[in-house]
Image (cartoon, rainbow, N blue to C red):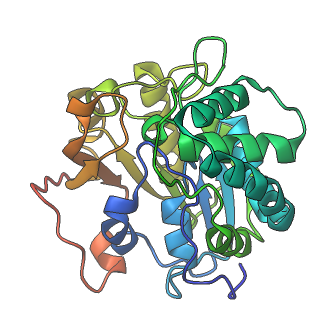
Amino acid sequence: MTTSAPRAARPFLKWAGGKTQLLDALVARSPRPAGATYFEPFLGGGALFFALIADPERRPRRAVLNDLNRELITVFEAVRDDPERLAQRLEPLQRRYLAADDAGRAELYYATREQQPRDPLAVAVRLIFLNKTCYNGLYRVNRSGRFNVPHGRYRNPRILDCEALTAASLALRDAELRCEDFEQACAGACAGDFVYCDPPFLPVVAGFTSYTQADFGRDDQLRLKWCIDDLTRRGVRVMLSDSPHDFVQGMYEGSRYRLERLPARRMINSRGDRRGAVDELVVTNYDPASYAVALAPASSAKSSAK
């Protein structure tokens, strides 16, 4: 991939389950690429991708980034391909929102939420605006696939961040963006490649799984485990971030995988009592220490290796 991506590249969206709190630990546990391709089948905010692009030792040769959320991928495509026009469309919307009183802001928010644009640039503008002004930065849809998060009432939200969009656009310049099932998204991974999986968590941590119209439940978690087993047999290096739910942990314990529990803070959640310090399960099919000078410390670390 390009070597000119700025170190400032970072997630430009708020995202439930985002990895900002764990970035140092995840980067330390990521393999050095040696010409490998990076696959991320559950992209979300893309925090680890941006961090790896900024790391000279771990920057992948190329990246395949995927998410089943079509609107999210449309935003990433707009940021990659047309950040200037995206900023031009966001600027008057930000100006109008910030100039309004509370009632006017709410009116603009709900009117925008009701829109169903088809033009990709308009889709991207709408989602960024909603993401920056909705309650707690959530993305949630109902059974009809309609975004249904209420207004957030922030005093001075930064709807347009030109620096972040420009940096992200450069980082994404050579990335391949897809919207398909996770199995298809990493089907092309070869021996030596690196796949990072960050699926929607089971409710013990996330509080909800209504990220797309279809929930990501136990059957999907099991299907992901089988996919990781297959990648492991093919010599692909895999790291998984997941809920420390007994069901999830039980699938990976006592086998070829290494398990650790890392502390993180979850400030984006629909319920206040589910924010705060939680453990996150990190599973690898390789020894992370072999790629790191010094691993970031794990809290209450629990390992299982063959």
Q: Quadrant of residue 285?
A: bottom left
In this rendering, does residue 32 appear at all? Answer: yes
Report whether 20 appears left or right of 145.
left
Please determine whether, in this image, residue 50 is positioned above or below residue 246: below
Report whether 13 appears left or right of 299.
right
| Residue 253 x %, y % | 22, 41
Q: Quadrant of residue 260?
A: bottom left
Q: How many marks?
A: 0
| Residue 37 x %, y % | 64, 67
| Residue 201 x %, y % | 38, 34
Q: Residue at x 54, y 68 (%)?
A: 10
Taking depth in this image into account, of 101 and 282 the one nearest to the observer is 101
Query: What is the quadrant of the N terminus in the image?
Result: bottom right
Taking depth in this image into account, of 74 and 90 the one nearest to the observer is 90
Q: Residue at x 50, y 61 (%)?
A: 47
Residue at the far left in the pictured view? 300
| Residue 246 x %, y % | 20, 29
Please determine whether, in this image, residue 275 is positioned above or below residue 82: above
In this rendering, does residue 305 appear at all? Answer: no
Residue at the far right in the pictured view? 119
Q: Residue at x 71, y 73 (%)?
A: 166
Please determine whether, in this image, residue 5 is positioned above or below residue 46: below
Query: What is the quadrant of the C terminus in the image?
Result: bottom left
Q: Residue at x 50, y 50 (%)?
A: 14
Please determine whether, in this image, residue 124 is positioned above or below residue 19: above
Residue at the far top in the pictured view? 143
